[in-house]
Image (spheres, rainbow, N blue to C red):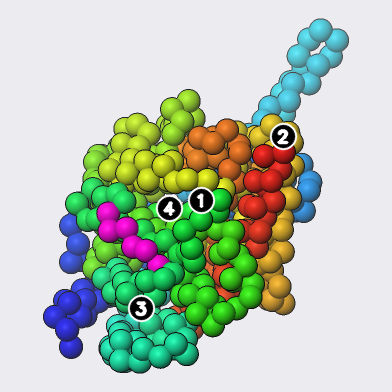
Amino acid sequence: MKAWKVLYVAAVLCLPLAVECTSSSHHHSHHRTSRHRYSIEGTKAAMDAALQNPHPRLDIRSIKALQDLNEAVTADTRVRADVVGSDKDVEAFAAAGELHSTTEIHNGKHIRGKISTTSAPMKVHKHKEYSEEAVVTKDRGEVTACLERTEGYLEELTKNLSSDVVYTENPFFECFRPSHEVFDFLDTLAEQNPQFVTKYENVSVTYEGRAIPAFKISTSEDSSKKTLYTQALIHAREWQAGAATFYTMAAMLDDLRAGNDAATRLFEKFDWYFVPIVNIDGYQYTWEVDRMWRTNRHLSKLNGEEVGVDLNRNWPPEEYFNLDPSDVDSETYPGDFPLSEPSTAGLFDFITNLDSLSGILDMHTFGGQVLRPFSNQPGGGAEPFGSKMRALGDSVRRALSTQPDVHYQSETGAYLYKAYGCFDDGMYLQYNLTVPALTIEVEGGDFVSPQSTIRPVGKNIYLGLRQFAHEALEYRKFVEEM
């Protein structure tokens, strides 16, 4: 067993003791209390009231409206939050959603009395079978076993150099992989396919000094071609989004090597750049210490807690940066100013220097959503761009929803709640709405996913990204005709 795997197993052995191998911080210390999963349901007004109260130890993973997306959202709209936390913290959050009102009873000009009413409390459903500690511990064991079982995946790839090798069938895709194995695999693909893949060793750098590489998939040097950009793992714990992106890159190469007509025609029109892991520091931390870590590793104090920077809240423009500091918590601290982090600053320079950029994708986990700008303001932007973006998002949603049990939603980021400093908003505004930018939340119900889902999810995401490319080309034509 390799030395790093010995260290990794040692880290896993610490997990049943509530991650006591880690340094103290809010994100770590809240694991010492038994944490379970809950659904909390109520009106949007009640949810708004609950969100206004501090809830630092509660992990609110999603909030969705229980209605058709075409219906307007009001204070009475029923919503459901998916949260992870302790019984005590969830009870406090639900109680904070109780709404109190007073109605005056008038007799002519005189007030005869007052009636005070309190809304019904939000409904709380506890998923008794879900314990975060148990889920993470089980996953650590299964991932370690898979890595050991498939230890020869790279040797299998390098020994068989025939053109009929199918990369997506390699044992690499049987497991979630740490960053060094991801880059070993992608580097091998680049070495074996110099006619298709160019690696850029250092397009940016992390807070801890790690180089962030990019890969370009292309079939020709043609200045008339358009450019697409895709990134993943800006949030460290979202392993499934990363795996789906790695799979898509491999699937593209499989198709190009096989002479697939659709892939060949696609790459006659586009060069496609990928940054497979944006938040390398945080991603490595999820392997070594805390599986549920989200932010980067630039730590600072927020309300007495040690937090990292949410790299998906760290983007320009300045006028939409951190407009609601009261909504910032340990998971969403945006940093001191836009592009304060070396990783985002470097990526911004890299992206904005790409020639003929025609589409941008940010891959996330989880929930099955195609999110378009804006998150920082109501609506989808000035017409006719807003309508075009809606049609684009809906088309990608349909491409991702061809399986009977997979149903994506297409909506703006601010459909229910606003968020500031997001990557897709920043890039869409940077190009004055002329370059479509989407966030895709890959299907699934948790940040921890079975490894058996890597290939099915990857295959589906590949279909969605191919559709995005076609829609981006149509959007580009629309812009050029204006």
Mark 2 or mark 3: whose residue is earlier in sequence = 3
Quarter holding the N terminus? bottom left
Q: Are marks 4 and 3 in contact (CB under 8 Å)?
A: no
Report the magenta residues as a range.
197-202
Residue 377 position within the rendered picture, expressed as x and y whole percent measured from the top left? 60, 33
Mark 2 or mark 1: whose residue is earlier in sequence = 1
In which quarter of the view is residue 211 placed? bottom left
Kindly identify the residue that appears in the image at 44 percent across and 34 percent down.
316
Q: Secondary structure at mark 3?
A: helix
Residue 5 position within the rendered picture, expressed as x and y whole percent measured from the top left? 20, 80
Residue 87 position within the rendered picture, expressed as x and y whole percent measured from the top left? 45, 60
The label number, if any, that marks residue 482 in the structure image: 2
Q: CA distance from mark 4 to mark 1?
A: 50 Å
Q: Secondary structure at mark 4?
A: loop
Q: Which residue is mark 1?
A: 223
Of 311 and 83, the residue lying toward us: 311
Q: Which residue is mark 4?
A: 58
Mark 4 or mark 3: whose residue is earlier in sequence = 4
